[in-house]
Image (tube, helix red, strand yellow):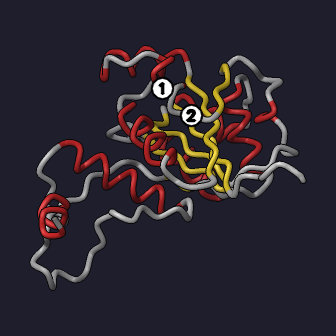
Amino acid sequence: MPAHQPTRRIIVGITGASGSIYGWRLLEKLGGVPDCETHFILSRSGERTAFLELGKSGADFRSLATCAYSNEDIGSRLASGSFVTSGMVIAPCSINTMSAIASGISSNLMVRAADVALKERRKLILMVRESPFHLGHLRSMTTLAEMGAIIAPPVPAFYHQPQTMADLVEHSVDRVLDLLGLPSQDAFRWDGGSKGGQSRREAKEGTE
């Protein structure tokens, strides 16, 4: 009998932009999705930022993934379109990485894997972390959108009445899971305000 093949293979990249918590939480949530493999790339700047922001090492992040790769391993299977995946998320995505992808400069595995996603017409979701944007940033985003990428900055929403920073992070991550076609069962959904705008915490307490 052939080995069972996962339904989904998702590449998760973390760069040196602020917001490594988004990548951490995304890996955690994808780890709970049945038949889903996570293939993880962490840049050196991303590892440094993650330690500064979360006190977590590269090993901590890699422990959440099915497979992990060195960003310098340009010959990795993730660099080939023949390795079929369901999409890639870079969370967070630095301006440096975004600009390299837009220019097709595949100088490391992160950028090459993103380029593969685009050329194979697979989902590429970039949680770009920067503000404000200058015209060059916006032009790179336009170029990427025209190439098929999804630009999804982690802009906080407040209609779910977040009580903690974790609530804000969760909402952005849940939106990315929606884009991947892997909706979270506990994601807050706007219902037109008919329930008075319950927060995630209130909704959870109401079911206990």
Instruction: Determine which residue is flagged by label 1.
Output: 61
Q: Secondary structure at mark 2?
A: loop
Residue type, numbered disc 2: Ala
Q: Position of residue 93 (x, y in %)?
A: 49, 36
Q: Residue at x 57, y 44 (%)?
A: 140
Can you name the residue that lies furthest to the front here?
1
Q: Position of residue 90 (x, y in %)?
A: 54, 40
Give the class, few, some or many, for how many residues have Cα within 10 Å of label 2's Cα (few <14, many ≥20). many
Q: Nearer the viewer, residue 54 or 48?
A: 54
Q: Position of residue 17 (x, y in %)?
A: 42, 28
Compared to residue 208, the image places residue 104 above or below, namely above
How far apart are labels 1 and 2 at the CA level? 7 Å
Q: Residue at x 31, y 50 (%)?
A: 170
Residue 65 shows which numbered tag? 2
Q: Nearer the viewer, residue 66 or 82?
A: 66
Horizontal side of 28 relative to 139 (left or right) equals left
Q: Secondary structure at mark 1?
A: helix
The answer to whether marks 1 and 2 mark residues whose Cβ atoms lie closer than 8 Å is yes
Residue type, numbered disc 1: Phe
Task: Report the number of discs.
Answer: 2
Horizontal side of 196 relative to 46 (left or right) equals left
Q: Position of residue 20 (x, y in %)?
A: 39, 31
Tell me, yes or no, if residue 114 can be seen here.
Answer: yes
Compared to residue 172, the image places residue 22 above or below, namely above
